[in-house]
Image (spheres, rainbow, N blue to C red):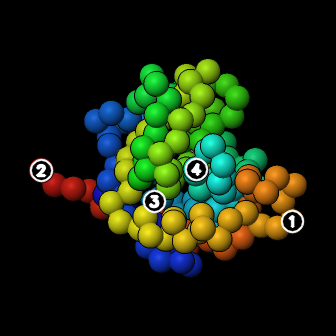
Amino acid sequence: MATIRTNCGDITLELDGAKAPQTVASFVQLAQKAYWKDSPCHRLTTAGLHVLQCGDPTGTGSGGPGYGYGIENAPVDGNYPAGTLAMARGQLPDTNGGQFFFVYDTTVLPTDGGGYSIFGRVTSGMDILARIAKAGVESTSANPYDGPPAQPISILSVAVTEKKA
């Protein structure tokens, strides 16, 4: 379990270390190092793709933790249901790092290059994601469906708690 505290409210997550062990281990390590403290979610997509992308402390979409790793637990059909938590990556399949995205409405993503690692799901806070999505993309964006969210959202902290069996 993890809680992402944002300036818009808390988003709680169930992490799936059984299906995505490397991704969850990286996420936990970055959370423990306060890697995402005070970092803005920099990208919202509102047409075709329905995701809010976060995890780059620079807020530019080009920052990373200094390492990369491969894809785990990507759906073969590219279907990412609402509530999915997945890793963002570059063009190459071994570029998972610190950026991740929330799927706020069912989305089909390309499977070219291997897809995107699903490593958890939102258990509470979908209302926050819906509010951000409803506000849309910043009016200064070159693409009215893809850019910085009009309602700014920043990660204040990430806390991970181990769920005991």
Q: Amino acid at mark 4?
A: His
Circle nearer the viewer, 3 or 4: 4
Q: CA distance from mark 2 to mark 4?
A: 34 Å
The relative height of residue 138 versus residue 22 in the rendered view (above or below) is: below
Tell me the residue that label 1 is attached to.
140
Q: For the residue marked with disc 1, what is the amino acid?
A: Thr
Are the residues at dot 3 and dot 4 in contact (C-beta closer than 8 Å)? no
> Which amino acid type is shown beneath numbered disc 2?
Ala
Q: Residue at x 56, y 24 (%)?
A: 111
Mark 2 vs mark 4, foreground winner is 4
Query: Which residue corresponds to mark 3?
Result: 32
Give the alpha-carbon distance from disc 2 to disc 3, as whole Å: 22 Å
Counting from the top left corner in percent of width and height, residue 129 is at 51, 65
Q: Quadrant of residue 115?
A: top right
Q: What is the CA distance from the residue labelled 1 to the residue labelled 2?
A: 48 Å
Label of residue 50 in the image: 4
Is any part of residue 45 visible from this angle? yes
Please tell me whether residue 143 is drawn above or below residue 81 in the rendered image.
Answer: below
Residue underneath mark 2: 165
* Label pair 1/2, CB-CB below 8 angstroms: no
Q: Earlier in the sequence, mark 2 or mark 3?
A: 3
Q: Amino acid at mark 3?
A: Gln
Q: Few, some or many C-alpha atoms within 10 Å of disc 1 (few <14, some 14-19, many ≥20)?
A: few
Q: Nearer the viewer, residue 121 or 21?
A: 121
Looking at the image, how many numbered discs can be counted on the residues?
Answer: 4
Q: Is residue 27 left or right of residue 61?
A: left
The alpha-carbon separation of the residues under discs 3 and 1 comes to 35 Å
Looking at the rendered image, the disc whose residue lies closer to the viewer, 2 or 3, is: 2
